Image: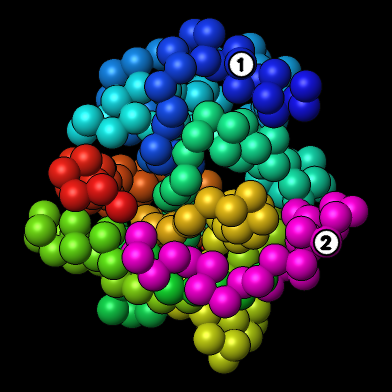
Amino acid sequence: MSRSAELAAIVRDRAGDEPVSHGLILGSGLGHIADEVEGVAIDYAGLPGFPHAGVSGHTPRLAIGRLEGARVAVFGGRAHYYESGRGDAMRLPLEVLKALGAERLIVTNAAGSLRPETPPGSLMMLSDHINFSGLNPLIGEPSDARFVPMTEAHDPALRAALRAAAGAEGVTLAEGVYAWYSGPSFETPAEIRAIRILGGDAVGMSTVPEVILARFLGLRVAAISVITNMAAGMSAENISHEHTKAMAPVGAAKLERLLRRYLRDFGRHGG
Ligand code: HPA
C-alpha cells in the first residue's frame, strides 16, 4: 500500500469513510476556520510523513468533518519551501486528500499587494500565477505525468463559484496574478518593481507549489490571498511576519464568510 493510502486509512479510521468533497489549505493567521469544522482534528504528528509546518501563525492539524454541510478536509498548517528546501513538502498531504476522495482544493494565503486598489484587508483570488522562484515541486517525479499543463490551472468553474459566493455575501473579491517568491526573507523594493513589470499583482511565499501539485493529482484548484500589507517599497509601513499575523484576521473574517457561503451553495447546487 502506498504511504498516502496508509495515511488515508488512518484518517478514515478516525473520521469515518464518507468521502471528502473539498480540501482547504489555510494560510498564516487564517487557522480559525479549522476550529469550526464539525468533526475530528488529527495532529500532523499522528500522520507519519506529514510536514512539521512549524511556522508561527499556522496550526499543524488536519480537521475532517462538515462545514456548512460539505464534507471537508482542512489543513490548518502548510509546509513552505523555505522551511526545508523541499518544493514538494505538501505532496504527501495532497496525495492523502486525493485518496480521501476530494476533487477540489481551495488554497488560502497571506500576501503582499502590488496594487494600491487592493490595500491590506482586501481579498484577491488568483486568476493566475507566476513562479518567480524558479523551483518546481515536480522536479524528480519520474513519470510523464510530470508534464502538467498549467493553462487554466486556476479552475474557471471553481473561480466562478467563489466569485458568485463573494457577490452573494457582499464581499469584495479582487482578482489578480500572484507571484511566488521563495522567502523566508521578504522581497526587496527592486524585486517588487520587477514583479510588477512582469505582471504580478500580489506576492507571497506559498501556494504556487500546491497549485502545481494539485493539478498533477487532478484536483480542481482555486486560491485566495488575504492581503496583509503593501509589498516592499510601496508603503511606509514595516513588513514583518508579526504584521502579517496581526493583519490576517482583518481579511480572514470576510474570507470565512465567503468560504462558508461557497460550501453551503455547493451543497445545494453541486459543482
Ligand atoms: N511578501 C511575501 N510574502 C508575504 C507578504 C509579502 O509582502 N505578506 C504576507 N506574506
Reply above or below: 66 against 82: above
Determine which quarter of the picture holds residue 20.
top left
Locate residue 191 relative to residue 64 in the image: left or right: right
Reply above or below: 36 against 82: above
Reply above or below: 196 against 51: below
Residue 165 spot, x, y in % from top left = 19, 56
Q: Is residue 120 visible?
A: no
The residue at 43%/59% (across/down) is 222
The residue at 48%/39% (across/down) is 102
Res 9 label: 1
Count of numbered circles in the view: 2
What's under tag 1, amino acid-wise? Ala
| Mark toward the start of the polypeptide (2 vs 1) | 1
Is ligand 1 closer than 8 angstroms to the Cβ of mark 2?
no
Residue 9 falls inside the magenta stretch: no
The residue at 62%/65% (across/down) is 180
Residue range corresponding to the magenta coloring: 132-159
What's under tag 2, amino acid-wise? Asp
The residue at 39%/58% (across/down) is 224
Residue 253 spot, x, y in % from top left = 23, 44
Please, which residue is most extreme toward the bottom here?
197
Which quadrant holds the N terminus? top right
For numbered disc 2, what is the local secondary structure?
helix
Locate residue 53 relative to residue 13 in the image: left or right: right
Give the residue pinned by disc 2.
144
Pointer 2 with pointer 1, Cβ within 8 A: no
For numbered disc 1, what is the local secondary structure?
helix
Residue 36 spot, x, y in % from top left = 28, 25
